[in-house]
Image: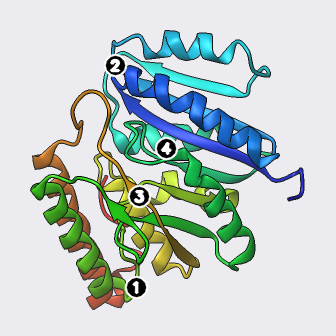
Amino acid sequence: MPHAEKVAVVLAAYNEGPNLALLLPRLRAVLDALGLPWEMVLVLDGDDGAHEWVARFAQGLLPGQVKVSWSPQRRGFGNALREGFRLVSPDAVYVATLDCDLNHSPEELPRFVEALRQGGVQVVVGSRYLNGGMVSVLPWWKRWASSLTNRALALLTGTPLTDITSNYRLYRREVVQGLAQACGANDFSFAPQVILHLARRGVRIAEVPIAFHPRRHGVSKLPKASTTLGYLRLFTVHLFLRLVPWGKGKARDGGG
């Protein structure tokens, strides 16, 4: 692989200190093994001391190789990822996102890089539901929300993706540059909002199968009510854009 293809990994976490302590050494080993320059961009919210542990973790790395934005208050998933995208270095070629609760295995990241380099696509999404994927455990309400959202994607855009809600992704750097302005959702509907926005603009998206594991520590931070409302708002906006072509320039791609 060409050495110039720098990888930036954006991680958004709210009180996930114990899980980060397990994830980051594994992620570092994966990135080192890729043989590419890399950086981690961590957007950390909460008061569990995770930002202090990350500062110690970064001491053994190159200056600027780990960037941290910390707030004691919860900023929301959408705001956190937008902040992370803003902090990505201009020389990064690829931008990855994955969950910080160990639902996602960092060891699968090289397959994303290979798919993006060879597949003629601009975004690679990790799918739990693609052939070869696996879900170790998922609460019924999360499975219901995920299934509903993925079915709606096919109806709204005709994009045959199987896992629109997955946050395990690898983007080309130029793809994420306009997302802060185009995608305004601040809850977990930000993830499908991004895919809908990109699909409507003809961005080429592929999927690779992934394994989805239960979190090691703590409980899910996904708020059921606000996430459900966010999905409904997203569907309503995109249904309007699909049925009323002249509305394309009138509405943002859902959320706000």
- Name the quadrant containing residue 115: bottom right
Q: Which residue is mark 1?
A: 160
Looking at the rendered image, the disc whose residue lies closer to the viewer, 2 or 4, is 2
What amino acid type is highlighted by mark number 4? Answer: Arg
Q: Earlier in the sequence, mark 4 or mark 1?
A: 4
Q: Residue at x 58, y 48 (%)?
A: 107
Could you say where residue 194 lies in the image, as x and y percent from the top left? Answer: 43, 62
Q: Which residue is mark 3?
A: 211
Q: Which residue is mark 2?
A: 46
Could you say where residue 248 lies in the image, as x and y percent from the top left? Answer: 39, 79
Determine contact: label 2, label 3, CB under 8 Å. Answer: no
Looking at the rendered image, the disc whose residue lies closer to the viewer, 2 or 3, is 3
Q: Is residue 93 above or below residue 247?
A: above
Q: Earlier in the sequence, mark 1 or mark 3?
A: 1
Query: Residues under labels 1 and 3: Cα distance?
Result: 20 Å
Q: Residues within 10 Å of mark 4 (few under 14, many from 20)?
A: many
The residue nearer to you, when weighing 136 against 205, is 136
Q: Residues within 10 Å of mark 1 (few under 14, many from 20)?
A: some
Tag 1 secondary structure: loop
Determine contact: label 2, label 1, CB under 8 Å. Answer: no
Q: Earlier in the sequence, mark 2 or mark 3?
A: 2
Q: Residue at x 18, y 56 (%)?
A: 142
What amino acid type is highlighted by mark number 3? Answer: Ala
Query: Residues under labels 4 and 1: Cα distance?
Result: 26 Å
What amino acid type is highlighted by mark number 2? Answer: Gly
On screen, residue 64 versus residue 215, left or right, reads right
Q: Which residue is mark 4?
A: 82
Q: Earlier in the sequence, mark 3 or mark 4?
A: 4
What amino acid type is highlighted by mark number 1? Answer: Pro
On screen, residue 239 versus residue 181, left or right, reads left
Q: Is residue 201 above or below residue 192?
A: below
